[in-house]
Amino acid sequence: MNSNSTTAANSKGSAPFETPDYQKILEEVYEEVKPHIGKGKVADYIPELAKVDPNQFAMSLMTLDGQSYGVGEEQKRFSIQSISKVFTFTMALKMYSKELYKRVGVEPSGSPFNSLVQLEYEHGKPRNPFINAGAIVVTDSLITHYKDEFITLENILGFIRDISQTPDINLNPYVAKSEMEHGYRNRALADLIKSFDNLDNDPTSVVETYFKHCAVEMSTKELARSMLFLANKGTDPLTGKEFVTPTQAKRINAVMLTCGHYDASGEFAFHVGLPGKSGVGGGIVAVVPGKMGICVWSPALNKYGNSYAGTLALELFTKKTGLSIF
Ligand code: GLU
């Protein structure tokens, strides 16, 4: 425990416990990770993302009482990409409850994020809501609920603004357009799912809405804040608003743990030991149940499409703090 630790009485009033100096720990992590920032490759299959400078880094955390700590460019917004799947899955689970699992499973895929092969032999039912195929089905379910793709997008943005308590969050239309122009695999996934009758709406409007929610931009500070409801059994600890039930929050965390990093999910659980979700923009969110939300960002990716320096930073953080669910 470092010298700047603060001491507090625990809830039973017995032996005091120490609150680690999270700011100092984040600074140590930043120093150790610096030589690795820029290692890997930025996502270049979306041309607009290929322009991003790989030598950037930020890490933030927010505890359940609203204390926030951070290092690097923690106010800088970046493309959240697949992190948005946590938000759309949360919305769909709230709307459809168990019915949702008839259309999308909760098993790890063991396949790359944009794989078509598994979907073919599993008759158009995606393994989980965090691979692209599953997220496309989830977006379709939202469009069915709101009856219109534009209203759906407005509601997704509204939800993200609400959980992050940040009213000016928006999407980058150039990133969405760039993906619309080059996202052949995702369009193929949507068409394949439609051919198995697991898509209600027009595949083009579904992928377009999917690309738009992937193109939302947020900072690590805003994303760490937006994970608090998942760290607190579905209720925002600062506003008291219940977004999902405790059981649903448990399910979302479980799917993040087992499926949040595509075919590197096992490795992430092994090295970091927290529910987490990555995006090809280089962001990773993580949840420490009962304690905090975390987000790290560094755009260069490892071969699985997860931030290289970001994964390392989270591993160092859990090692130094002992914060892991295991
Ligand atoms: N929009 C990206 C895609 O569908 C998201 C992938 C990701 O962030 O992992 O390819």
Image (spheres, grey):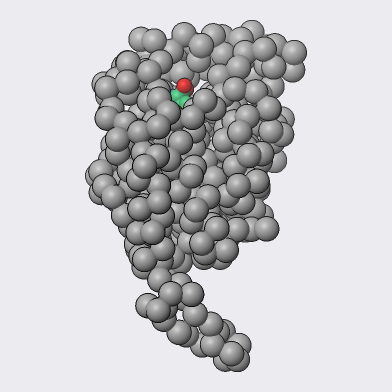
* In this view, 13 is above or below 37: below
Q: Position of residue 122 (x, y in %)?
A: 74, 17
Residue displayed at 54% across by 87% down: 16
- Looking at the image, residue 257 sits to the left or right of residue 80; the answer is right
Residue displayed at 57% across by 35% down: 261
Residue displayed at 64% across by 18% down: 198
Q: Position of residue 62 (x, y in %)?
A: 40, 61
Q: Position of residue 31 (x, y in %)?
A: 35, 53
Residue ranking furthest to the front: 35
Residue displayed at 69% across by 22% down: 125
* In this view, 52 is above or below 246: above
Residue 232, visible in the rendered structure: no
- Looking at the image, residue 121 sits to the left or right of residue 11; the answer is right
* In this view, 228 is above or below 98: below
- Looking at the image, residue 129 sits to the left or right of residue 316; the answer is right
Residue 9, visible in the rendered structure: yes
* In this view, 303 is above or below 155: above
- What is the tally of numbered marks visible in this picture? 0
Between 75 and 101, the residue placed more toward the observer is 75
Between 200 and 210, the residue placed more toward the observer is 210
Q: Position of residue 26 (x, y in %)?
A: 39, 59
- The quarter of the displayed image where residue 152 is located: top left
Between 262 and 214, the residue placed more toward the observer is 262
Task: Please identify the quadrant where the C terminus is shown.
Answer: bottom right
Between 1 and 12, the residue placed more toward the observer is 1
Residue ranking furthest to the bottom: 14
